[in-house]
Amino acid sequence: MPPRLSVVSFARSLPLRPRAQSQWIAQPFVRAAPTPIRPFSTSKDSTDALPHISEEAARTAKIKGEQEPDLEQGTPVEEVVKHDKALQDKLPKVMQDALKAKSSNSTPPGSRSYSTTTVSRTGGDLGIVDFSPPPTATDVPGTKFGLPSLPLPQGSHVKHRYDPVVDQVTNLLMRHGEKSVAQRNMALILQHLRTSPIPTINPSRPLLPGAPPPSHLPLNPVLYLTLAIDSVAPLLRIRNMKGAAGGGMALPIPVPLGKRQRRRTAVQWILTAASRRRNKGSGKGLFAHKVAEELISVVEGRSAVWERRNAIHKQAVAARANVVIPRKR
Amino acid sequence: MPPPSSCIRGLTRLRAAQPSIACRRTGDASIQTASFSTSSAHYAIVAKKKTISTPPPKRGTKTLNVKKGRKTGPVDTGKPPAVGERKAMRKRVVLSNNNALEVPSLVDLSEENVLDTKNQGLVRGIPEEAVDALRAVEAFKPRQGWSLFRRPAVLYRRETTELAQLAKGVEEGKKTERRIVTGSRMSGKSTLVLQGLLMAHLRGWAIINFPEAQDLVNAHTEYGPLPGSSPTQYTQDTYTANLLSQFLKANKHLISLPMTTSPTLPQPLPPRATLRHLLEIGITTPESSWPVFTSLWAELTQPGRPPIMLALDGLSHIMRNSEYLSADVKPIHAHDLTLVRHFVDHLSGKKTLPNGGMVLAATSSSNSPANPALEFSIQCAEARKMGAKETPMWNPYKVVDMRAMEALKNVDTLHLSGLTKEEARSIMEYYAESGMLRAKVDEGFVGERWSLAGMGNIGELERTSVRMRV
């Protein structure tokens, strides 16, 4: 007996979309992708246009010149009543229950047939850089080669050619104004991250939500670095206001930090923790080696930097009553 | 107060009780015992030094703490790394990166295709067995970029093809090819030597490599005069024994060959000895390592044996005085060390290899003492190659090592220039396929990196495309 259903044609009508993932802003490489647009001409639910499954299969088979399924043989009741609400109400209780159980597994009620999130803007799974196409020569009078398309791709501005996190960490690594030494150390750190084994994530120390799986990290060392820093970056700092609590006591006031400030705090914690590590070898790249080890231990949740972050957050929660909210006039 | 008469009596008594001046000088303890023994003073219980032990301050009280340097970082109290551990870490050679992606299109070099000109401009893998051999002769250097990729692979560049042509000539005509590998810094000189060793190994030659010429002359290994040599030559027994053990590991296809000569060695060889027995004598007893080396060489140069590849890195170290001193505290010239002399004789063409072979000496640009003789010889060789009518004049105000000049008189050079753009593209595609380079390798990108790398200097190319902070 031929298959009653053509699996291929059935599967084709299913929309296959990846699960929507929350967008992680710290992705270093960003590619502009067109957002899917649903034209208004297509209706939301196009299910009523379809005939019954057996009939559709029969029609497809007829077109393809294959043997049609036997329509006389009957279709399971579930399939018949699938799209008919009125019929479903008249089913026996057992079948109604079974239907409900099945539908609870699938999409929740009230969900739309189309995706409400944008397609992930990172290129592919590994975030492979895809340079934007060369600027198209537009007919702008007075320009010989046309105008470049904006925004300019990453690395095209000489002063901002590196990733912002890499730039910031390089500057924080710098001692006595020796930037090229700091840059070499930065390169060594990234190289160490690239060659170190895949980190094992500690579930009790969760990284940023939406972080890529750990197997993707070593091949993208900038992402690895960014993830380690952003994961332990504190949200606030405690400002002790002298004498504000009365009786000579200082009043702890939690103050929110900006993105760069948060990263700066985290990097400084990491650098202090790294300088306390022991040297294992000899030569030039020792500090870079220690910093890289510390970054790995941050991602794996072993670092003491996490305790520091938690302590600050705990203190901030305790002092949350002191938060000053500026009054609007 | 006593009467005056008793005072005088007292004074006289005091004088009688006073010991002689000599006694007084020796101190109080000996006065009491008045004997020639000092043991009582020795055995006296030593009074303990008074220690000022103040109890710690009570909790809650403030103490004045003026000790300086209180706030310096924590003192490292852990055990320091064991002897040699730091150096081992520094000199570690890592040849694989498990994170790097396997390159499916990578074809291994083999005995058949290693001398093929079709390889030119392509990246080729090194088979595992050859990796072991090259590792044994220390052809891989710790600072090279092997640790970034899944497994070792080399770019078959234009100069490699040139080397392959030379090797073909050696195999066909039993010639002895002698070359000095020159080129700018990071242009791949050591890697070209590695490629030469790789070719030789895959074609079944005997390979002997001096990975760092500096180690031969910097007086870090023991040395001794060679008996019966005039003028005195010096052997380096430990180094030679190590060289023999490297030979044993790297030339597994040769060590089962039977001995054809019967050398006189400190230890007797067993009957029906093979090269392995000979080598083992040299490895276990470093005193006999030099005679073993000479008899090994005699064996390898017998008719019917394979060609030999002799390679050395860091040529300028052995073209001047070594750090060793002779018995009359004069510096020993590097050419008076037996191993160095052996190499230099073959490089200069004074001795030839009867079964054919190749002698490669790479210069180094990052670790090389100033050597006017070597520089001038290279200039002359390049002028000869270009077909110049007059050889360059040498600077009479520079002190030149005449023995080095004599040795390098007619040696040719193999100059390494930058990669072509096609070669650069090929190796960058390999980087990208390994997952180390995260960019689309197109013409514009290759051109940009090629120019950034100083017109295709391969070391700089690797730096700009893989190692930089991108």
Image (cartoon, coloured by chain):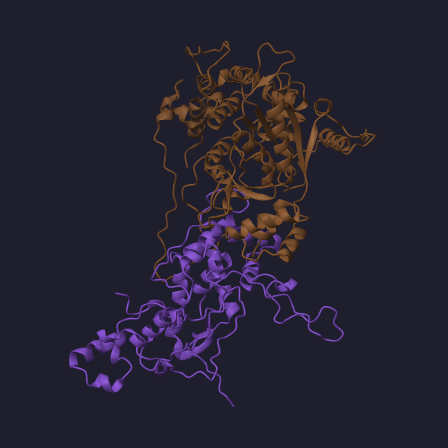
Chain colours: A purple, B brown
Q: In this orientation, which residue lies closer to the viewer: A288 or A190?
A: A190
From the image, which quarter does the N terminus of chain B lie in? top left
Is residue B306 visible in the rendered image? The answer is yes
The number of numbered badges drawn on the structure is 0
> x%, y% of residue B293?
53, 18
Height in image: B241 above or below A158? above
Who's the residue at 76% across and 74% down the image? A142
> x%, y% of residue B352?
64, 19
Q: In this orientation, which residue lies closer to the viewer: A307 or B152?
A: B152
Height in image: B159 above or below A36? above
> x%, y% of residue B364?
64, 36
Q: In this orientation, which residue lies closer to the viewer: A115 or B395?
A: A115
> x%, y% of residue B279?
47, 19
Q: In this orientation, which residue lies closer to the viewer: A104 or A293?
A: A104
Instruction: Tell me the quarter of the picture where residue A64 sits.
Output: bottom left
From the image, which quarter does the C terminus of chain B lie in? bottom right
Who's the residue at 56% across and 64% down the image? A164
Who's the residue at 48% across and 37% down the image? B127
Left or right placement of residue A79 versus residue A174 in this view: left
Height in image: B91 above or below A327? above
